[in-house]
Amino acid sequence: MPLLVMKFGGTSVADLDRIANAAAKVKREVERGYDVIVIVSAMSGKTNELVGWVEGTSPLYDAREYDAVVASGENVTAGLMALRLQEMGISARSWQGWQVPINTTSAHGSARFVSIPRANIDAKFAEGFKVAVVAGFQGISVEGRITTLGRGGSDTTAVAFAAAFGAERCDIYTDVDGVYTTDPRISSKARKLDKIAFEEMLELASLGAKVLQTRSVELAMRYNVRLRVLSSFEDTDENSGTLVCGEDEIMESKVVSGVAYSRDEAKITLFTIEDRPGVAQAIFGPLSEAGVNVDMIVQNISEKDYDEAHPGAVTDMTFSCPINQVARAQKALEDAVAAGKIKYDELIIDTEVAKVSVVGIGMRSQVGVAARSFAALAAEGINIKVISTSEIKISVLIDRKYMELAVQALHDAFELEKTA
Ligand code: ADP
Ligand code: ASP
Ligand code: MG
């Protein structure tokens, strides 16, 4: 029997009516002859509420208990979806992660898949069940504890199931009708793409375009899963939405294909540190052990290159990390100071920054993208605080209050509203 994976995100299962709407889409595919694995998110807002409860109880919480709490949102939707399908006459059964079992690493809060044995679900299909509804975002560790995959993780569950079960396609149903040149909620000029290359989607996702979780794109690329993003609120067919696929399938070739942003960034500067071998390790080692995801890093020549209080060369180190990791980062650095591993004159924390990035595989062969980006930002009077580049992206850290303006300015500068 051909098999499809259909994933419904939070807004697509936000209430009983929307669950019914999603179930009707599943029913249609069953009637077309497919067995279906449905992956569901928690109802919209639920995971945020659960995270809030955890943080309200224990600010530097035990990650095992965080997972025990936040994984529960998906369990509710999985059961409700199975019930709704049964009401529609479709034989469906729900599965929590541990029941499959979805085996993951023990990295609570950002676990990775180890294996997804097919036997239990295959046995149910063999019994005549047409739909397996699986709770997204969760799994079970070797210690037998519930794990979660990181925010947005149900996308990754969907792709992993598509790979494990050899699905014909992995359809990600969401509240927009595809992947756009930038977030359509920020720019009315955003244009829907029919196709986007894995590499570009990977870069856009990792730079903040939350329409797909980064790891879902990584997995799709590795296992060559046909991955599609489409609307759960519109009538859809085989040609709807955006296909994420190999570069060779893409006709359009623009230098820049999209603009991404990440709102909740923080910038931390260690002012006046020693400039000696090993100092970067002494700073970033403890940050990594504390689970801080350091992103951009800049080391520059200090104004205080030499003075009597600081014999020897000194410098400053600046890095960015997600805003909700600032407390952890600060504690790790202060502990490293107390242990005599590092010293600095001052720790400057700026929590009012955002990151904006332009992405495109065309940048590999085209120069001038950085200059054009910086000119567009300068024309709007936007100051750049940190820059980082790779082969196919340019990112800048700017004041958060200019984030929307920067996205629009860059979108205009590369004429992304027009097709190539
Ligand atoms: P779901 O709950 O279905 O997983 P998400 O909220 O995680 O949905 O992702 C969908 C959202 O991603 C859209 O509502 C949109 O605001 C946002 N988004 C950001 N960048 C893009 C983009 N380039 N194209 C489409 N949507 C984007
Ligand atoms: N419910 C989880 C979250 O909000 C996972 C997901 O929706 O993909 O992050
Ligand atoms: Mg999502």
Image: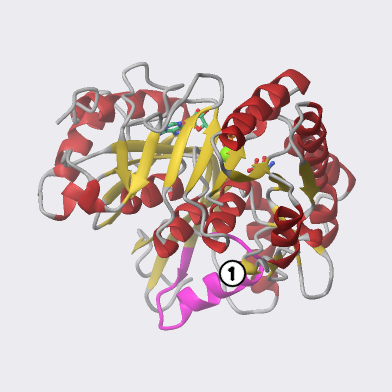
Q: Amino acid at mark 1?
A: Ser
Q: Is residue 99 left or right of residue 270?
A: right
Magenta-tinted stretch: 272-293
Q: Which residue is mark 1?
A: 288
Q: Position of residue 44 (x, y in %)?
A: 70, 29
Residue at x 44%, y 55% (from the top left corner): 225
Q: Depth check: 149 or 154 in front? A: 154
Q: Position of residue 188 (x, y in %)?
A: 36, 16
Q: Is residue 213 left or right of residue 238?
A: right
Q: Is residue 290 magenta?
A: yes
Q: Is residue 420 magenta?
A: no
Tell me if residue 89 comes above or below residue 99 in the rendering: above
Residue at x 84%, y 54% (from the top left corner): 68
Q: Position of residue 69 (x, y in %)?
A: 85, 49
Q: Depth check: 104 or 306 in front? A: 104
Residue 236 visible, this angle: yes
Q: Depth check: 140 or 5 in front? A: 5
Q: Residue furthest bottom?
A: 277
10 Å neighbourhood of mark 1: few (<14), some, or many (≥20)? Answer: some
Screen quadrant of the C terminus = top left
